[in-house]
Image: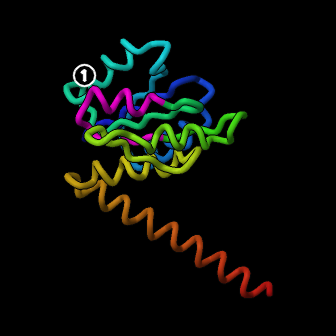
Amino acid sequence: MKKVGIVMGSDSDLPIVQKATDLLKSLGIPYEAHVYSAHRTPAEAKAFAENARSAGFGVIIAAAGMAAHLAGALAANTTLPVIGIPCKSSQLDGIDALLSTVQMPSGIPVATVAIDGGANAALLAAEILAVTDAELAARLDAKRRADAEKVLEKDKTISERL
């Protein structure tokens, strides 16, 4: 199975990345996580992206706040799918990161999830890998069924209560 590469621009993004790693673990997907900055360690970020395919990665998740150029910087150096997680900051509640992540120029796409959307980034990465992995696709189907059951149980509880 291909791995998921996770790059965060700062260790302050770890709580958001943790949501992604927890979900990847639950689905049995191998991953590596690193801290590389598009601005402070551009050579390391570039090297990671350039070598990701040969290192066994199938998709990259990039989490960054504020200017949030990390996902774009990685995407510029690989043709692997890159999923950006814009992280909330104290200045603009993550809107700056969202716009920086989603507004990529033509030719360098970055899939973007919601602000602080670590879980959805992991699910999208899993869905990308599941295109060629039937066992992973079955695990995703089972997760969806389990999630639906939880909602239906809550519906039943609320209906009985009201």
Please state the extent of the stretch shown in magenta in the rendering.
69-84
Q: Residue at x 41, y 37 (%)?
A: 61
Q: Is residue 64 left or right of residue 52?
A: right
Q: Residue at x 62, y 41 (%)?
A: 94
Q: In the rendered structure, does residue 82 fall within the stretch colored magenta?
A: yes
**45 w.r.t. 81: above or below:** above
Q: Amino acid at mark 1?
A: Asn
Q: Is residue 109 left or right of residue 142?
A: left
Q: Which residue is mark 1?
A: 51
Q: Residues within 10 Å of mark 1 (few under 14, many from 20)?
A: few
**128 w.r.t. 73: above or below:** below
Q: Nearer the viewer, residue 80 or 142?
A: 80
Q: Quadrant of residue 6?
A: top left
Q: Is residue 161 left or right of residue 25?
A: right
Q: How many marks?
A: 1
Q: Nearer the viewer, residue 124 or 137?
A: 124
Q: Residue at x 24, y 22 (%)?
A: 51
Quadrant of the drawing holding the C terminus: bottom right
Q: Position of residue 27 (x, y in %)?
A: 41, 49
Q: Position of residue 130 (x, y in %)?
A: 27, 53
Q: In the rendered structure, does residue 99 fall within the stretch colored magenta?
A: no
Q: Position of residue 97 (x, y in %)?
A: 55, 37
Coloring scheme used: rainbow
Helix, strand or loop for disc 1 = helix
Q: Quadrant of residue 157?
A: bottom right
Q: Nearer the viewer, residue 113 or 94?
A: 94
